[in-house]
Image: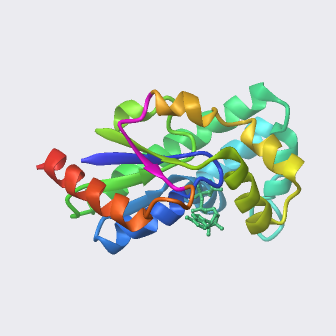
Amino acid sequence: MIVGITGGIGSGKSTVATIFKQLGIAVYDTDSRAKQLMQENEALKNSLQKVLQKTIINADGSLNRALIASLIFNNTTLLQKVNALVHPAVAEDFTEWYKRQSSPYVLKESALIFETNTQHLCAAVILVKAPLEVRVKRVMKRNGLSKEAVLERMNNQWPQEKKETLANFSIENGGEVSLIKQVVKLHQELLKLGG
Ligand code: ATP
C-alpha cells in the first residue's frame, strides 16, 4: 500500500517521515530523489539540455541547477516541459524502488502531491500541518532566508487550507501536540487499512 505524505514547506514532512522510519516504514523522498536523478540520469540530463537549449551540463558532467532554476523561473511553459521530463523518470524510479520494499506500507513523501494531482496513486494521503507563521520561522532559520524569500517559495504551493479538504489524515506539527503520539496512532490505523 502506498501512502502519500505531504505538507507545505517547513510543515515538517521530513521530520514526521523520520518517525515513521523508526517504526520500520520505508520512505521514498520524492523531492530529493528527483534532484538526485537529475544529477545522475544521463538520458534525462541530455533531454533537459535539449529542451532548455542552453549548456546546463557542466564540464565535469554535473548539472547546473542554478542555471535551470533561473531559466524556468517565471517561465511556465519551460517549467512544464522540464516537469514532463522529470516526472516520468521519478515515477519509474519509484516503481522500481517500491518493488523492492517489504514494509507493511510505504510512505511517498512529496511537497506537491495535490499540486501535481498524484493523490490517486496513493491509497491515502497524510497532510502535515503547522501554522503559517511557524513554518515561515522554521524555514528562515533552516535555510537562512528572509521572510519575503520564504513567502515567495510558499506562493508556488497551494495553501494548507486547500490541501486539508483533500487529505485523508492529518498530523499537527505546530509544536503543541506530541508528534510521536500522533504518528504511532496513525501508524496503527494505516496497518489496519493495509491489512
Ligand atoms: P521542506 O518541504 O522544506 O523540505 P519539510 O516539510 O520536510 O520541509 P522539515 O524539514 O521536516 O519540513 O522541517 C522544517 C524545519 O523545521 C527543520 O529545520 C526541522 O528541524 C524543523 N522542525 C520540524 N518540526 C519541528 C517541530 N515540531 N519543532 C521544532 N522544529 C521543527
Q: Identify whether 140 is placed above or below 194.
A: below
Q: Residue at x 65, y 50 (%)?
A: 9
Question: Can the viewer see residue 68?
Answer: no
Residue placed farthest to the bottom in the image? 22
Q: Residue at x 71, y 44 (%)?
A: 48
Q: Identify whether 112 is placed above or below 136.
A: above
Query: Percent from the top left, x then y, of residue 24?
Result: 28, 71
Residue closest to the eye, 86 or 46: 86
Query: Residue 118 falls in which quadrant of the image?
Result: top left
Query: Percent from the top left, x then y, of residue 167?
Result: 42, 35
Q: Is residue 101 left or right of residue 54?
A: left
Q: Is residue 28 left or right of residue 163?
A: left
Q: Residue at x 14, y 50 (%)?
A: 192
Q: Is residue 54 left or right of residue 13?
A: right
Query: Residue 139 falls in which quadrant of the image?
Result: bottom right
Question: Can the viewer see residue 169?
Answer: yes
Query: Percent from the top left, x then y, of residue 191?
Result: 18, 54
Ligand 1 location (quadrant):
bottom right
Q: Which residues are magenta?
A: 166-173
Query: Residue 182 falls in which quadrant of the image?
Result: bottom left
Q: Residue at x 77, y 31 (%)?
A: 78
Residue placed farthest to the front in the image? 176
Query: Percent from the top left, x then y, of residue 168?
Result: 35, 36
Residue closest to the eye, 15 or 50: 15
Residue closest to the eye, 45 or 175: 175
Q: Is residue 79 magenta?
A: no
Q: Identify whether 154 is placed above or below 115.
A: below
